[in-house]
């Protein structure tokens, strides 16, 4: 598995729009070939991350333009450019019994 983490910062005054806009994308996100799962998390100060887990780096690379296009739809909410980190190896951890 391969992981991309996108760091973003939303204007605090626009945080109310963020959750709805992300929800609106869910159907489109589910259609991304090779995407295993994705999460977004953010704080009240507007700092957030989106974590996307892909079957492989090649499939993540193929999806990159589509994902960039999705992020472009958030430009009016973002107070800074997004930053992307990638991870070649991902391990799913489960805790508890």
Image (cartoon, rainbow, N blue to C red):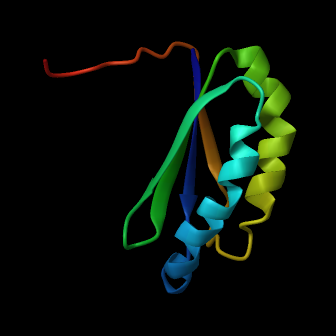
Above/below status of 80 relative to 1:
below
In which image quadrant can residue 85 be found? top right
How far across and how far down the image is residue 90, in percent?
48, 16
User: Residue 72 location, x and y as percent?
Assistant: 80, 60
Q: Quadrant of residue 22?
A: bottom right
- Say left or right for 85 vs 81: left
Residue at x-position 37% and y-position 73%: 44
Which residue corresponds to the image point at 71% horizontal and 50% vertical from the top-left? 27
Locate residue 40, reporting x and y percent. 50, 51
**Left or right: 6 as drawn, with respect to 95:** right
Please identify the quadrant where the C terminus is shown: top left
Give the image location of residue 9, x and y in percent.
Answer: 54, 65
Q: Nearer the viewer, residue 93 or 87?
A: 93
Relative to 97, is 69 above or below?
A: below
Quarter of the image for the N terminus: give it.
Answer: top right
Q: Is 82 rendered above or below residue 63?
A: below
Residue visible at 68% across and 14% down in the picture: 56
26 is higher (above) or lower (below) than 97? below
Viewed as shown, does residue 47 lie left or right of 24? left
């Amino acid at each position: 598995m391969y992981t991309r983490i996108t760091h973003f910062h939303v204007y605090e005054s626009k945080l109310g729009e963020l959750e709805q806009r992300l929800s609106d994308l869910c159907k489109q996100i589910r259609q991304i070939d090779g995407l295993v799962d994705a999460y977004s998390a953010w704080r009240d100060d507007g700092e957030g991350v989106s974590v996307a887990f892909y079957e492989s780096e090649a499939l993540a690379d193929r999806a990159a333009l589509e994902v960039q296009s999705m992020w472009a739809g958030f430009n009016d909410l973002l107070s800074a450019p997004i930053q992307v980190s990638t991870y070649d190896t991902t391990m799913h951890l489960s805790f508890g019994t």
